[in-house]
Image (tube, rainbow, N blue to C red):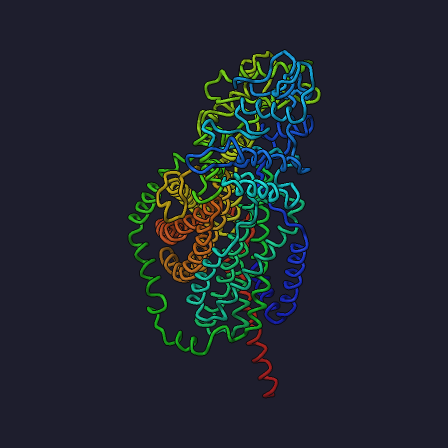
Amino acid sequence: MSIFLYRLGRFSYHRPWVFILTWLVILSGVVGLAVTSDAKISSAITINGTQSQAVIDQLRTEFPETSGGQGTIVFTAPEGQRLDSGERAEAIRSAMKEISANEFVVERDTSALTSKAPQDGRVTDPSRAGATTGTGPAQSPAGGRPGQKPSPADQEKMLQQALLQQGMLAPGVLVSADGSVALMQIQFTQQVEDLPAGVVDDVVGIATHRADATGLTALPTESLKPQKPPLGGHEALGLLVAGLVLVLTLGSLSAAGLPLVTGIIGVAIGLGGAFALSGSIELTSATPVLALMIGLAVGLDYALFIVNRQRHLILREGLAAEEAAGRALGTAGSAVAFAGLIVIIALSGLTLIRISFLTTMALVAAATVLCAVLIALTLLPALLGLIGERILSARTRRREQQRSYEQRHGLAHHYASALVKGRWVVIVGVIALLGVAAVPMSQMTLGMPSGATANHDTTERQAADAITRSFGAGYNAPLISVVRAPEGGHFAAAQLPRIAGAFKQDDSIETVRPMGISPDGSLALFSVIPVAGAEAESTKTLVHALREDTGTLTGVAGTSIGVTGLTAINLDISEKLADVLPLYITIIVVLSLLVLLVVFRSLFIPIKATAGFLLTISATFGIMTAIFQWGWLKDLVGFDTPGPILSFLPIMVTGILYGLAMDYEMFLVSSMREAHVHGYEGKKAVVHGFEQASRVVVAAAIIMVSVFAGFIFSDDRMVKQFGLALAVGILIDAFLVRMTLVPALMAVLGKAAWWIPGWLDKLLPNLDIEGDRLAGYLRERESRDTRGAVGSTADSLS
């Protein structure tokens, strides 16, 4: 491996334009495809195999007009005023009519409000007094004769009277008891994210225009919030800090610019490919952000590790830039290749869980990491070939030669020696500190972002607060219940009010509204409003109780109930992810243990590395719980309301952090392994290896933390949580676990750290991460060159 990479490095160095042009062609092609394709970002996060998704699929087949997405717009009147009469009421009715005229909006049937015999099985809410369910002939409100067909104007008045009796201004528009808030519910023919461009904007624009004209405020909820990649200027701050660290570490702008160039190219290819394929894969808003986070972090780190090794070989061993580049790729490049492999394994392991949106997120991120590795091993040495000896100025070379050993290694040597000397105190102290940080993790709850946890200055939060204040928290967490008739039976419209009344016997249900019957009568739909919000335990218990019911709640023996809607979908996602998290951790730990066993040829190193990671992840989740659930430091982080941890954050962060943590383990312990192979023993190998790798590991960790921390300032709560979790995780793992705990543990293990049974040692392939074979190859080549030079001299003398 090391010899192959050494040759690849020299080949790239001598033929830079071959690799530069190749990567430029790839970049141009991918970006071109991304720009010309219709990039599509989905807000829907679904998990196949859940009960809520099964109900949606059932409706799509048997009752397609009800399977589309839903949106809500909240109208609010100025304080102390009403909107349920006069021009304001008429403005809301007009807005609903205009919106319903859109071909992608389902027009609500009003026959049940003006006729005793609804034509499509839809009925009104039986829980409100005054429902028009009488048996006599319709009467004209204008005093028309019995049996005479009302005029269109009279029919409109009758409809408005019937609606107001049921607390509605128009079909699908509820009004609060005090008349200050109206809730417009819109049913689309397709899922919101599948609607053509401009449809949602048109709907919101109509509502806003009508509201503004009469002094009302129209507040779209999160269901109508446009989904765009939450990328802005925040990541530029992280890049700025990363650039500064690179300059300080590598000592020149030309050297520092290389990791930035290669990192950005790798991310551009990864993200461009994702957007180019967004028409055929489920690309959520978090997918490009995660790819950007991880791609930038590993791309900068991998290039830094190789360039720093070349710099070290030039300054310490006096090698030419060409030879130093080849050797840097043969040694540091091997560590980069296997560090990247571990990250890719950790991310790709998510595909085994068979959750579609997680699979897409993981594969896009893994592909971006793969690009970063390939670019570091091919494009980077080509760029080094263009720069040549200018990678280090003559002034830098002279200054380095004049520095003493203490000046070069003083701090790292003293720090490592202190860790080795006080190893037991260090071990106990770090474990105790991380154990305390992990305590809040026991109270971590998972959920999905909603308007109720958005910042106060957002329309979705203002809408959620208005709904809770005027209707109750349950109206922010509606459930769609699909009741299936007993085998061979079917529902009639007359049964719906009685079933709705039976539903309401449950104390955790606020109200039930029939939505209709499927064409064959086998399904009856109800909108169920719980008493409490989506995160309340009573709401979660209600969802499970409805699904387990066999006829008690409906009053019809043999019926079964399916539950869907955003609240049920989010609950299913959270529970499914919590269930598969232990399996995922087991999968990636086993696979990565095997990789580490092959790389380090040791039994204890992989176990130690994994145990350290478990400390890291526990402390990270504990800190996340304290901040986002308990509200600690919320003003500093930039959010208003504590809430649950994003349901798929633990499983994604576990995979990402495991891979990145093993990067640092690889960089640090491979240097210790290299020192051990080259003659240093026991504690001396620990100190020497730490000296060699500590500078670049510290720089790499600061770069990663800077990149991830830049996303903490995003307005998107989901991105904010990911940025903070990864920044905190890297900070803990790099500085407390790898740079502090690992040297202390290695000193305790001593020579035993590298022990492996002889039979296992023979079975494992020798990947030569530490470059021992490369060193032998170089010695043999130098010997041949020396013999050839001596022979040439002898021939000339003769």
Image quadrant for the C terminus?
Answer: bottom right
Q: Is residue 254 above or below residue 69?
A: below
Can residue 428 be spotted in the picture? Answer: yes
Quadrant in the picture for residue 631: top left
Q: Classify residue 694 as left or right of residue 67.
A: left
Q: Is residue 381 above or below residue 70?
A: below
x then y, percent, for residue 299: 53, 58
Can residue 491 be spotted in the picture? Answer: no
Q: Nearer the viewer, residue 173 or 472?
A: 173
Image quadrant for the N terminus?
Answer: bottom right
Q: Which residue corresponds to the image point at 56% horizontal and 80% vertical from the top-left?
A: 790
x then y, percent, for residue 502: 53, 14
Residue lying at the far right of the rendered structure = 520
Quadrant in the picture for residue 159: top right
Q: Nearer the viewer, residue 98 or 299?
A: 98
Q: Which residue corresponds to the image point at 64% horizontal and 44% vertical from the top-left?
A: 281
Q: Classify residue 692 as left or right of residue 213.
A: left
Q: Is residue 502 above or below residue 753?
A: above
Q: Is residue 233 above or below residue 582?
A: below
Q: Nearer the viewer, residue 618 or 609?
A: 618
Q: Nearer the viewer, residue 628 or 156?
A: 156
x then y, percent, for residue 416: 34, 58
